[in-house]
Amino acid sequence: MREIGHWIGGAQTPGTSGRRGPVFQPATGEVQAEVALADPGEVDAAVSAAVKAADGWRETSLVARARILFAFRELLHRNVDAVAEAITDEHGKTLADARGEVTRGLEVVEFACGIPHLLKGEYSDQVSTNVDAYSFRQPLGVCAGITPFNFPAMVPLWMHPIAIAAGNTFVLKPSERDPSASMLVAKLYAEAGLPAGVFNVVHGDKTAVDALLDHPDVAAVSFVGSTPIARYVHGRASAAGKRVQALGGAKNHAVVLPDADLDNAAAELTAAGYGSAGQRCMAISVVVAVGDAADGLVERLAARASAIEVGPGRAATSEMGPLVTAEAADRVRGYVERTDARVVVDGRAVTVPGHENGFWVGPTLLDGVSPSSEAYADEIFGPVLSVVRVATFEEAVALVNANPYGNGVAIFTGSGAAARRFTREVSVGMVGVNVPIPVPMAFYSFGGWKDSLFGDTHVHGAEGVRFYTRAKAVTSRWPESAASDAALHFPTAR
């Protein structure tokens, strides 16, 4: 059985804890590898390697850091297919979807290549007589990332390129369900010339997570995952004195007004709801059909959901792959079995010839879902699209704002006035207008509101740079003589 070890101090290392976890091929249900699960000692070895490399990397010039990031960017660009294939084989998503994931992560690397400009400070001449003031930003030290299974390349790439470009060293704890993408990235960093210990990967479960959250040499923690775990990570790491950004779960709504192009809306919502088998934190899981839009929209959604080609991620004809584990598939089926809503399209019995043991759930469409039901309240994280019917625009906005999550939302309309009002009134961090998955580009920042974010800063973009650095303000005077006019009163400008 192939074993996936850690990457510590610039080299691949075998696990020493004796604990292993299975890595499945979701399309067949077979165990294709075992991943080492780190114990606190292995986590400490990774952090120690990062500490050892920190001083040298911090003192490396901005231009030299940027050149390594440029080299890494070229290598990742050349190896998009290799990383995508590793994702498909362990996550299950289609190759086209996996390539898109890597490409969006690559955009953050390209943003980080501009670090000399992004870290420019401020300077004020003559703030007082013969006194100048300036500020600049410095790295934090060792930073850690704890990332989910659904985007094994993109989400880590939201974090470590910016942290490393800013002069930090990094320890990544990716999901143990699909660990190979992170190992490929580590090798590409080494090939690009990144010094040993600047980027490290440790695999594991809660034991490894807690070891990172508690480690005294870890200065900052970035996390993406479910809301309960985000809350836990934020609380435990904050209690240990660390800087924390913890992105939680979502229940993303798409409001469809009667004046919307229903054919376009149905096409976009089908892609947004069922892409990656619904295993996206930005997937649309609730369609809010307003007034007369409902019947025609449900009819169109049903036709499109029924036509989706479900199959192995490597098959050219597949539009949607399996779920990541058998437990995930069983959990999604359970929501459909318990619902009181009308099951318009039922994906529970979907099978794929030649892959009968895969973790399959087909596209599922529920109509007339009640906001008080568990299908509405919970983050199902599977290919289930729920339609909630409301009478007015005001009811739709109130429904979205009452939801505890605030990650992403969309509105489909032909009215600029309605769109503008919606974007201003809705209590959600990322909003799409006729765009169902409003994931910002790398030069903006990604993050939600309410129970979708714990901490003050979002990931990547300008907020990512601020998160991985801290400001230092300097007030400077170079007197021309030894004489001093110092006084005991509090200094003021003159």
Image (cartoon, helix red, strand yellow):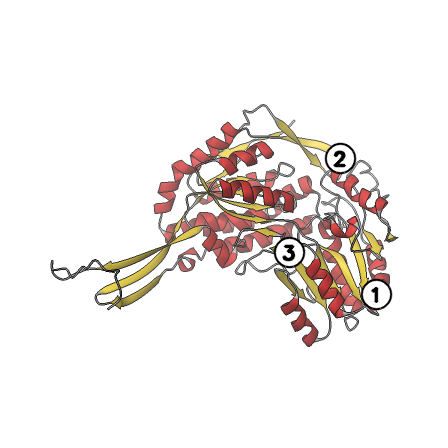
Quick check: 256 left or right of 231? Answer: right
Task: Write the residue at 80% across / 38% down.
Answer: 355
Residue 226 visible at all: no
Horizontal placement of 251 versus 460: left or right?
A: right
Which residue is the site of mark 3?
407
Between 136 and 340, which is closer to the camera in this rendering?
340
For badge 1, the amino acid type reads Ala
Mark 3 Cα-neighbour bin, 10 Å: few <14, some 14–19, many ≥20: many
Q: Amino acid at mark 2?
A: Gly
2 vs 1, front mark: 1
Q: Look at mark 1 in the image and give the residue it sits on.
A: 294
| Residue 299, position as x, y percentages in the image | 86, 62
Which quadrant holds the C terminus?
bottom left
Q: Residue furthest top?
A: 18
User: Where, quadrant-wise, is the N terminus in this rendering?
Assistant: top right
> Mark 2 and mark 1: span between their CA atoms?
38 Å
Give residue 487's position: percent from left, percent from top.
19, 59
Near-viewer residue (245 or 64): 245
Hey, what amino acid is under mark 3?
Asn
Q: Earlier in the sequence, mark 3 or mark 2?
A: 2
Residue bearing mark 2: 29
SS at mark 1 in the image: helix
